[in-house]
Structures are given as C-alpha cells and as structure tokens.
Image: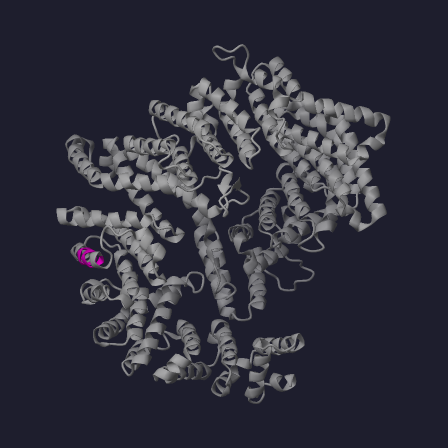
Amino acid sequence: MAEKLRDLSKPIDVPLLDATVAAFYGTGSKEERAAADQILRELQSNPDTWLQAVHILQNSQNLNTKFFTLQVLEGVIKYRWNALPVEQRDGMKNYISDIIVQLSSDEASFRRERLYVNKLNIILVQILKHEWPARWKSFIPDLVSAAKTSETICENCMAILKLLSEEVFDFSRGEMTQQKIKELKQSLNSEFQLVHELCLYVLSASQRTELIRATLATLHAFLSWIPLGYIFESPLLETLLKFFPVTSYRNLTLQCLTEVAALQFGDFYNMQYVKMYTIFMVQLQTILPPGTNIPDAYANGSSEEQAFIQNLALFFTSFYKSHIRILETTSENRAALLLGLEYLISISYVDDTEVFKVCLDYWNILVLELFESHHNLDTPAATAGMMGFQNTLVSGMVDGLGSSLLQRRQLYAIPMSKLRMLMICRMAKPEEVLIVEDENGNIVRETMKDNDVLVQYKIMKETLIYLAHLDHEDTEQQMLKKLNKQLSGEDWSWNNLNTLCWAIGSISGSMQEDQENRFLVMVIRDLLNLCEITKGKDNKAVIASNIMYVVGQYPRFLRAHWKFLKTVVNKLFEFMHETHPGVQDMACDTFLKIVQKCKRKFVITQVGENEPFVSELLSSLANTVGDLEPHQIHTFYESVGHMIQAESEATKRDEYLKRLMELPNQKWAEIIGEASRSVDILKQQEVIRTVLNILQTNTSVASSLGTFFFPQISLIFLDMLTVYRMYSELISSSIAEGGPYASRTSFVKLLRSVKRETLKLIETFLDKAEEQPHIGKQFVPPMMDPVLGDYARNLPDARESEVLSLFATIINKYKAVMMEDVPRIFEAVFQCTLEMITKNFEDYPEHRLKFFSLLRAIATHCFQALYQLSSQQLKLVMDSVIWAFRHTERNIAETGLILLLEMLKNFQASGFCNQFHRTYFLTIEQEIFAVLTDTFHKPGFKLHVLILQHLFCLVDSGSLTEPLWDASTVSFPYPNNMVFVRDYTIKLLGSSFPNMTLAEVTQFVDGIFTSRSDLPAFKNHIRDFLVQSKEFSAQDNKDLYAEEAAAQKERERQRMLSIPGLIAPNELQDEMVDS
C-alpha cells in the first residue's frame, strides 16, 4: 500500500491517500497511526509530491487530505517558487484562482467549504507575494471585476484583500527583503482606488450582513496605510458614522473609526476630526447614556457588549493620543472632550486587565505631557528654548505661554483629581510585598512573582508620581482622607488598605522633604493606631505588611528621624515573633532594606541613648532571632553585617563582629573539638546540618561586611578546609560503594551542600574584599590541593561546579597576579570538565556555564597563559569555545561568543596572529555561519555579526602577513587572502543553500566586503540574506533587532533619573549615604 503511494511517476491513488490521512487522524491503533504518519512525512519531503496537487484536490473527498496537499504546496511556494518553470507557475496560479471563484460563487458551497476556501486564500496570497506586481499586473482589476459578479465572491475578495494588506504591512518584517516590501506597498497604494470604490459601493448598496461585515473588516486592515484623501475627501467617514449606531456593525465600525483616529499627519484635516468626534459623541450618548455604571454594565454584559466597551477605550485613547489639542479650542469642543474623559475614567474602573491596560497606557501619556509642560513652566527659558525663541523675547512670551499653560491645567484639573483617586484605588502590588490574599480569602505568603502585575505597578507608579507633581496638595488630601476612612471603619477592607498603602509607598521621593515629613508622620501614626485597634490575626498581618512596605519606601524620612527609625525597627523585631505566614519574611527583608539605607544611624550613640543601637541589639540577639527560621536568621545576620560595616573604628568593628558571631563560633568550636577526639561525630546528619547552617551564617555576614570579615574567616578557614577534604572523601567512598545511585541519597546531598557552601563562603569573601593581593596570596595556596586536587580526583558526579566559579572569581579579582597559577588550574579542571560537558548539550548544566566563565576570566586577565599551552591544549580551548556557542542554552552560547570575540582581538594583536588564524580562521567562519543561519540561535545575532565583521575586516588589515590557505593542498595560486576568503565563502554558502542561485550568493558575499566597515549597513545586509536564504521566515524575528531596543531602554533610564521620585529612593545607588 505504502509503495503504491510512494511511486509518484503516475497519478497518485487518491482514495488510498484519503484512507491514509483518515488513518492518521482516526481512532485506529497506535501502529496504524504511526505508519500513516511515516507515509505522509515521506510524501511531504518528496520534492515531486506537489506536482500531483491539482489531481489530489480535484478528486479527494477528505478535507484533511486537501489541507495536507495545500501544506505541501505552501512549502513549494515559499521556498522554491522562483526556481519553477513559467508554465508550472502559471498553471498553479490559474488553478488556485479558478477553484476559489468556483467555490465562492454560490452561497451553499461557500458556507460549506469555508475552511478550505480560507486556506486557498492564504495560498493565493503567498503566490501574490512572488508574482505581483511584476508578473501579474492585472491582479487588482481582475479581483474587483470578479467581486462585482456575485455577493459571495465579493465577500471572499474582501477576505483576500485583508490577508494581502496584513502580509505586506503587518507581518513583512523578516519575511521579505526590504526592497520587496517597498515594492508591494507602492503597488497597493497606487491601485487602491478600485478597491476603495468597491468598498463604498458595497456599503451603500448591499443588504447582506455577512458582506457588510467582511467589507468593514477589510477596511479596518486598510485604513492605517491608505492615502488620506480616500478617507477625508470621500463619503467614507460619513458612511462609517451612519453604521455606528447599528448593533450588528457597532464593533467593526468602532474599530475602523479607531484606525482613523490613530492617524497622525499635521493639521490639514483638523476640522474633519472635530466633526467626526462631535457626531460620534452625540451617537454614543444614545447608545451608552452618561452616568451609566460602566463597570457594572461590563460585568453583566454579553461578550459583544464587553468588546464594545474595550473598543470604546481604544477609540478614545487613540483619538486623544493624536488629536486632543484640537478639542481644547472652543467651549463646545472642550465640553465634548471632558465628557469623553469622564467616559474613559469610568471605563478605567472596569474589572478586566486588558481594558485597564489600554486606559492606563493612555493616562500615563497624558499625565506625562501635562507634567512636562508644567515642569518646563518652572524653568521658562527652557520652554522658550524648546520652542526656538531667543532669550530677549522670553519674558513677554513666557507670560503668554504661562497663562495658556495654566488655562490648560485648569481645564484638566477635575479629570486629573478623579484620576488620582483611580490610581489610588487600583494600585498594583509592588514586588516587596510578600503577603497576599488567596482564592479562599485567606492571607498567605506569596509563592510566585506575577510579572504582569509588576509591569503594571511600574506604569501606575510613574503616572501617580506625575500626578503628584501636578498637585501635591490634592494627592496628599485624597490619601489622608482615604486613610481616615480606614480608621473609622467606613471603608475598611484588605484591598482598600493595600492599594492605598502601595500608592503612598510609590510616590516616595516626589515631595519636598518638609512636606514628606509632615505627611509621613500622619501616615505612620495612623497605621500604628490601626494596628492597635484592629482585632484578628489576618487583619493584623495585612496591616503589618503595609506598615513594613511604607516604611521601607522612605529611607530619607527614617534617616532624619531617629525616634521613628527606632520605633519602626523595634516594631519589625516584634513582627519577627509573629508566626503568621509571610510576616517574618517581610520583617527580615524590610529590616535589611532599612539598614542598608540608614546603617550609620545604628553605630553612633544617639541623643538620649547610652550606647549605639547595634550594641543594644547584639546584647539581645539570641532573643530577637529566637522564632526565626534558618534562612531568616541569615538575612538578619546580613543586616547586622551592614551595620558593623558602617563603624569606622577598627577595634569597635572587630568587637561587634566577635559578638555577632559568638553563637555560631561557639557551636563550631564544639564540633571541631569533638571531631578531634572522634572523627565519626562529623558523619551524623544532625551535625552536618549544623555545620551547613554555621557556614551559611558566615556567608551572609561576609556578603555585607566585605574586607572587614577577615578576622572571622581567618579563624575558621583551615578547619573548614579540613572538613571539606574529609566530606569529599566520604562522598567518593559512598559513591564508590553504593554505585551511581548513592550520589542521589540525602546523606551525600547533604555532604555536598557543605562543600558547596564552603566554596561559596570563600568566593563571597574574596569577591567582596577590596583589591588586596596579599589576601589572595594568603588564601589561594592552601586551597590548591584540598579544592583543585580534590576536583580532579573526584568522580564526575561528585565534582562541585562551584570550584569553577570560585577560581573564575579569584582570577577576575586578582587578574595577572594569578598568571603562574593558571597552568595548575588548567591541568586540574580543564580536560576532566570538558569530558563531562561535551557528551551532549544537557548533562551538568551548572558546570557548563561556570566552566565558560572561568575560561573567559583566564582569556581576559591571563591571556599570556594561553600562549604557553601546547597546540593540543589550545585546540581543546578552541573546540570548547565552538561547543559553547553551538549551545541552544542562550547564556552559554552568549558566553562562548563573547569569549571568541575577545580571543580573536587578543590574537590579532599578538605575535601568534598568522599561526592562529591559519589554523582556525576557516573553522570559525564556517561555524559562525552555521549558527547565524540556525533559527535556534537568533538571540546571538548581534554577536554573530560582530565576529563576522571582525573576520572580514581582518583579512586585509595588515595583521595577517602570511597566506591563510595551505599551499600544499590548494593548487590555485590566490593573489591574496581577500580573494581566497571571498572564494571560500561563496563555495561554503553555495553548498549550504541549494535554493539560492550562484549569482545571489556572490552578490551577498560581495556585499559583505563592501559593507564590512559600516556596522549598521553590514547588519542589514545580513538580515536581508537570512530572509532571502529562507532560513528565517514565518517566525518571530525580534531578536534580530534586539540591539536597537536596548539603546532605547538606556535613553529612557536617563530620562527617569531627571524627575524626582520616578526611580524610588531605595532603588538608587547610595549617593545619599547617611551622614
């Protein structure tokens, strides 16, 4: 049976093919389905299957068979169309056109075969992308005349036009070359008149609902790009506004009007826009009377009605984004504008994320615009400068300008005040808040971060800060009024208190200091009162979480008010005994955050105190952390480390450190003492857990104390290495005795945790300690054997990846000082790690990433050491780099590419330039082209381009003084490297892309050489090649444009830094260290 289908020399047996497809989609046995799948795959990959397409489509009775055939056809059209003979192309084009006309000419077959016709339309548009306009000039006139023959054909023609518009204008980036897109846009523009007449004719003459809906949908696709005369100088807008009140067309019409509203092109059609808006508002008031409770209407509405409210939000926001200024001119327009803003504020209360996002996005833009003109009013010269006036004119001008700006602010004062209320009521949850309400209404600890909410918080915070700058009084009044209602109980609910406190926290940094002080004293006082008077564990947890959030947001206030700071910290200590889920975590996190911003305050003796707070805290340390879990204790210890770090006097600092570490050190000394009498004590699980906990506590303090942790680490360092070596031997013997499964037992896992934590502690300390080579020299030699030797001796499953990251940190820290140790590091870790990670792309993921980081550290700081490697060892290095960038794991591939680029630059400048490139140039070029054209590696595009640019510029840069080719194997005498590399590249790409002609490949390679010194041009040239080679089509190509997006992001950050409050005080680096 299968053989019969595989033989394509005679017409295929269609009933048999139908049966095979039916078996694949059917409910038969697994074997039957697998066999059918195999046959269909073979047919799909056979280059001649498509020649039978017409025969199959005419005779098949099974819709799935037809879809299968069209899929095969689509592949041919996308990838091989231009290589087919003319008669085959014309035959296919005519057949598809005829079958579409035939099926859509009568109502019954059109409705019955709808899915099939839709797929045929897609195929036709794929053909058009190749044929039109050059080889099928009459396409649009043919289509329009066919449409006039019957209403169903007309409906389908609308669908084809809509698809064509989307293909050219919406999905073309990365699908077609830039030249082709330009050509198609011009053709669509120049032939639009016929389409326009057809649409107007249908809308005025047809009575068929489906046809009118299809026409409106097509118009919606076209309105964003057609020449404007077709919209404003024809009856189109009036026709659309006529359809707006009709229920069945309301949503489609609204989408069309939204497209028109979003167009921007100067002031030429302002009058038409005012007229359109005015008529629209009159009609809207009959559909949705002002004063309707829109959130309720939305909650109880049908899906059509809900879509209408969402579309309404889109219409208002699009119109205002482009044309709000023209509505500010006369009093009638202003009234209509304010009414529209009322509607939009009401829609913003709708409980639906998508609707809210649309509104919020616009509120952010509007408020920013009002804020900027208000901000510039404070610096008049800047405003005038922006408008291009000389300073002599400024004074008179600013008065005029100022009064118009003030009028504008008054116009928007009421909507802005309502908007403040909206932001306060709907504020999103910030990242720091860990306590949430679950679906059963219980207060629990948050387990997953919700990124959508965080993005929303960022936009709302920014909007509220602009609103606060526009009117601090109103902002403060609304917040305090709402807080009062919480206290009096008339407005009390978890959600109301949460959103209010999140809003209060979010405007931190936007007020003047005295105003902020006044405001916060009232807020914190009210919140502490609320905590006292409210009963119930859950209620208290919610209030506690809000108090902690608010105080964490205002470090400037706490620094200026010791009494408040002390009260707050003592309150946090109280919360550390509160066992409600999430409260203790948040108390420890907030404590850490406050200490980082106010650490100096805790080490000086404050007025009215006998000793610094840190000393008082250390005396009652055991009691304070009594109820905390180990991970919370570690955070607490890290916080105290920050305090001690702020003490400038060495003796006091060391004394505090000693007192802080007293408990863990006591325990450590006990364990080591007992172990010296009997080693077996160290094998008890309880003891291993204690050792782990002590090491983690040390790591936490080292992370905040840095260099000053030296006395403590010196105390335990050698004992720690002894324990490390002993546990390592225990692990090896367990695995040797228990076989591969032993490495998964809880005992071995626990021992490995101790080894990892030891490495992490040393790495943390060396990383945070300041540049002092003597520290490196003191700590590195004792570790060589226990750590490096141990790594090499161990079984692969018992090797800790942290060894690699520790030595990467050491080399990054002490740079060339480590030069003589590199050969030992290399010997111990290189070969044995490579054997672990080059078997496949999956095993030992941690070792992979850290291995390449170590390699990069060596290549960056100890490059000389690479010259001393034997050629075998260097080949190992190069193979591992190539292995890295072939990786589909994004960060490993990126590390490999960055490393390769650094090595290429270093070798170019070295005496080994010729030797290195003769061995590796062609391999690197070939490998980079392989990943460049592999869609899994799209994120590496920017680096692929930089490496290729480096290689092609190197060829004749003068650095290479010898030929790159091997004269003994290459018989052709090339005049220079440039000619050789050009020739090699053409052959390489020609054999890799059989679907491209030799001329196309040659043109691309010549383009590489002409554009290589201009990076943007070089990059575009390669993007076009990727599209042309058809490796990158029908996919998301945003990674090819990632670099441009990153530059935009940095500009945005600079803008945010210039406006007080936009970057919260606790996110700023410590410029404002407390004095």
Please, which residue is most extreme toward the bottom here?
Answer: 10
Instruction: Estimate the x, y position of residue 839 in percent, counting from the top left.
Output: 72, 55
Q: Residue at x 21, y 49 (%)?
A: 339
Task: Tell whether position 281 is magenta.
Answer: yes
The answer to whether one can see residue 823 in this image is no
Residue 826 picture location, percent across and down: 73, 41
522 in relation to 847, above or below = above
Dominant SS type (magenta): helix
Nearest to the observer: residue 86 or residue 967:
86
Where are the magenta residues, as a range?
A: 277-284
Taking the magenta stretch, the answer to whether it contains residue 430 is no
Residue 318 place in picture, x, y as percent: 29, 53
Residue drawn at x 57%, y 76% as measured from the top left: 25
Q: Is residue 1017 visible?
A: yes
Q: Is residue 493 left or right of residue 891?
A: left
Image position of 931 (left or right of 155):
right
Residue 163 in picture, x, y percent from top left? 37, 70
Color scheme of the displayed model: one colour
- 877 or 114: nearer the viewer: 114
